[in-house]
């Protein structure tokens, strides 16, 4: 079976978050289980890798407006049994991944995918699109009679643009642009395109699949998602973790260890790096956004710093960055802005607890990583955090408030003072299996079901 994944990013070639991480490991595991796996993604100007150009051509049918799109390139990298194809369009030949004109850019990318695959003889049994950037590909694949799966990694981001402009960019039949398909409150909605036209829709955790059918989490699309549930087209498959990349026994960025006792060296290193006192360490590695509850963390810092050192790594909302930068003057608070993978590893390994006060969390990988490193998560009960953090390992709270976060951290602090219980929690967390083998088998079963 040949499965073609379509996504805006794929680790290690391009990445801004969890979507790239998933595409960096799931296709490899599928290939190991017997599937032919191909990943199609844009050829960004800042791509971390050098694809071999295997095709170049011009598609007049991709023309938008008076200027035709010239010089469409296709690059290839074969790695760990997976074929990675990178489509080069002029609009993507710039540093960085995402910009204000992304709906336009991903409409062009979406229109190019099937044409480019056909030009180089790649004939998929299933097209698996990921998030709104692939929504148009799913629509085109459906119209071409191909079987499709569409995965929602974060429903909040939907790829919306005013219909007057965007309808020209898609080149879809007029009947697809109405309220029953791509139209949403007068806009084109590419997330909705994937939801409407896919044969099967998945989310990245079972709890998130249930949550998005409610007004609280449905981002305005809950009615459609309820219908998909009734039609048995919506399900949740929990993300796995790249357990080779995230393994304290072999991690080159930390003092390597295999049990809770060995973690002390990593904690000492982190304490020394940020000149922290002897209070236990609360770590955060996150995109700085309201979704992640970082504002709740900031509001809770006066209380948290009574018992914890706090180390935060992340970038995003300028207001949150500014607030954390101000707090970094406190002797028990350290903040580093932006992405820094080696430091992320040191925080996961060296912290005692790891805070994720998310307002919603489709799956989340940080809580899995932290447990694998013997760092106990403090999480809000939402989405994949419900599915992955057992009550006898982590510390869980329901309300998205600073007070609820502080109370959960206080519970953790009291448990920290009971070394035997704390070590037992660490051992249970380090022993959990978050490998991709099980989720990949679920995806293969879904692909095979569609092929019947």
Image: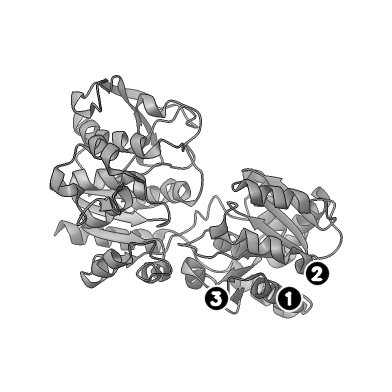
Identify the mark at residue 390; answer none if there is no mark: 3
Structural crowding at the residue carrying mark 3, measured as other residues with C-alpha within 10 Å and reported as few (<14), some (14–19) or many (≥20): some
Front of the two marks 3 and 1:
1
Q: Is residue 142 above or below residue 61?
A: below
In three-dimensional space, the C-alpha distance between marks 3 and 1, rounded to whole angstroms, equals 18 Å
- Do the CB atoms of the residues marked 2 and 3 lie less than 8 Å apart? no
Q: Are marks 1 and 2 in contact (CB under 8 Å)?
A: yes
Q: Residue at x 27, y 56 (%)?
A: 195
From mark 2 to mark 3, how far is it between C-alphas? 24 Å
Relative to the observer, which residue lies in front, 138 or 257? 138
Left or right: 264 as drawn, with respect to 140: right
**Disc 1 secondary structure class:** helix
Residue 307, labelled with which disc?
A: 2
Q: Earlier in the sequence, mark 3 or mark 1?
A: 3
Give the colouring mode of the picture.
Answer: one colour
Q: Is residue 321 left or right of residue 271?
A: left
Lateral position of residue 429 relative to residue 166, left or right: right
Q: Pointers 3 and 1 in contact (CB under 8 A)? A: no
Please state the total of marks drawn on the protein image. Answer: 3
Q: Quadrant of the image for the C terminus?
A: bottom left
- Give percent across and percent down for residue 35: 28, 50
The answer to which of marks 1 and 2 sits earlier in the sequence is 2
Residue 410 image label: 1
For label 3, the SS is: loop
Dot 1 alpha-carbon crowd within 10 angstroms: few under 14, some 14 to 19, many 20 or more: some
> Of marks 2 and 3, which one's residue comes earlier in the chain?
2
Q: Which mark is on residue 201?
A: none
Observer-side mark, 2 or 3, equals 2
- Residue at 79% from the left image edge and 77% from the top image edge: 417
């Amino acid at each position: 079976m040949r499965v073609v994944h379509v996504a805006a990013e794929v680790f290690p070639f391009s990445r801004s978050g969890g979507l790239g991480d998933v595409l960096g490991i799931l296709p490899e595991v599928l290939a190991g289980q017997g599937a032919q796996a191909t990943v199609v993604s844009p050829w960004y100007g800042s791509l971390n890798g050098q694809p071999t150009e295997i095709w170049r051509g011009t598609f007049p049918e991709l023309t938008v407006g008076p200027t035709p799109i010239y010089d469409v390139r296709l690059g290839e990298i074969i790695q760990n049994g997976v074929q990675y194809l990178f489509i080069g369009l002029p609009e993507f030949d710039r540093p960085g991944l995402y910009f204000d004109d992304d709906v336009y850019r991903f409409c062009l990318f979406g229109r190019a995918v099937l044409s480019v695959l056909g030009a180089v003889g790649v004939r998929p049994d299933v097209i698996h699109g990921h998030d709104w950037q692939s929504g148009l590909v799913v629509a085109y694949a459906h119209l071409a009679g191909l079987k499709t799966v569409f995965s929602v990694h974060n429903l909040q981001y939907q790829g919306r643009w005013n219909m007057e402009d965007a309808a020209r960019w898609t080149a879809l039949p007029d009947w697809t642009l109405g309220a029953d398909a791509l139209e949403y409150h007068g806009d084109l909605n590419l997330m909705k395109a994937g939801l409407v036209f896919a044969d099967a829709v998945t989310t990245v955790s079972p709890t998130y699949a249930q949550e998005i059918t409610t007004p609280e989490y449905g981002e305005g699309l809950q009615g459609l998602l309820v219908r998909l549930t009734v039609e048995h087209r919506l399900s949740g498959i929990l993300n796995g973790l790249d357990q080779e990349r995230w393994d304290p026994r072999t991690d080159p960025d930390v003092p390597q260890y295999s049990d809770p006792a060995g973690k002390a060296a990593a904690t000492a290193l982190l304490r020394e790096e940020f000149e922290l006192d002897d209070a236990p360490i609360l770590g955060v590695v996150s995109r700085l956004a309201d979704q992640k509850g970082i504002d709740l963390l900031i509001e809770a810092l006066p209380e948290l710093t009574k018992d914890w050192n706090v180390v935060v790594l992340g970038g995003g909302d300028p207001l949150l960055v500014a607030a954390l930068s101000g707090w970094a003057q406190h002797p028990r608070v350290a903040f580093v802005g932006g992405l820094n993978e080696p430091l992320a590893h040191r925080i996961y390994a060296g912290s005692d607890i790891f805070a994720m006060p998310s307002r919603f969390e489709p799956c989340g990988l940080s809580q899995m990583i932290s447990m694998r490193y013997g760092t106990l998560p403090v999480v809000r009960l939402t989405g994949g955090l419900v599915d992955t953090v057992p009550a006898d390992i982590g510390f869980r709270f329901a309300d998205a408030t600073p007070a609820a976060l502080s109370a959960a951290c206080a519970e953790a602090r009291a448990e920290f003072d009971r070394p035997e219980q704390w070590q037992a929690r660490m051992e249970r967390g380090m022993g959990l299996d978050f490998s991709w083998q099980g989720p990949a088998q679920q995806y293969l079963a879904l692909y095979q079901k569609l092929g019947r």
